[in-house]
Image (tube, rainbow, N blue to C red):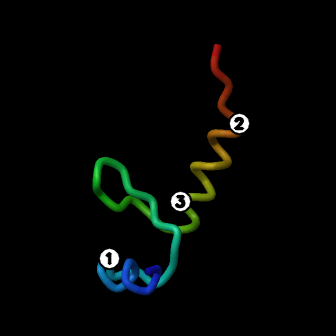
């Protein structure tokens, strides 16, 4: 399944980050988003 995803989206690695159906990045972006979510505090 992973190989199929990578082939269909023309990427070499996973995970990939999608926003509103548009790919916005790969593993580095996913890590950055995850780290930001951990540091953002809500009122």
Q: Which disc is residue 9 wearing?
A: 1
Residue 28's image quarter?
bottom right
What residue lies at 38% left-to-right and 77% top-to-bottom? Answer: 5
CA gap between label 2 and label 3 equals 15 Å
Q: Secondary structure at mark 2?
A: helix
Compared with 13, 40 (above or below) is above
Q: Secondary structure at mark 3?
A: helix
Residue nearer the viewer, 37 or 3? 3
Label located before the other in sequence (2 or 1): 1
CA gap between label 2 and label 1 equals 30 Å
Q: Secondary structure at mark 1?
A: helix
Q: Residue furthest front?
A: 1
Label located before the other in sequence (2 or 3): 3
Compared with 43, 9 (above or below) is below
For the N terminus, the image quarter is: bottom left
Residue nearer the viewer, 5 or 32? 5
CA gap between label 1 and label 3 equals 16 Å
Residue 17 falls left or right of residue 8:
right
Question: Which residue is under mark 3?
Answer: 29
Residue 7's image quarter?
bottom left
Q: Number of callouts in the render?
A: 3
Q: Mark 1 or mark 3: which is in front? A: 1
Residue 39 falls left or right of residue 19:
right
What residue lies at 36% left-to-right and 50% top-to-bottom? Answer: 19
For the C terminus, the image quarter is: top right
Q: Residue furthest top?
A: 43
Label 1 neighbourhood size at 10 Å, few (<14), some (14-19), many (20+)?
Answer: few
Question: Which residue is under mark 2?
Answer: 39
């Amino acid at each position: 399944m992973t190989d199929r995803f990578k082939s269909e989206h023309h990427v070499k690695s996973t995970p990939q980050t999608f926003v509103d159906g548009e790919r916005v990045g790969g593993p580095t972006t996913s890590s950055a988003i995850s780290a930001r979510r951990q540091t953002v505090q809500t009122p």
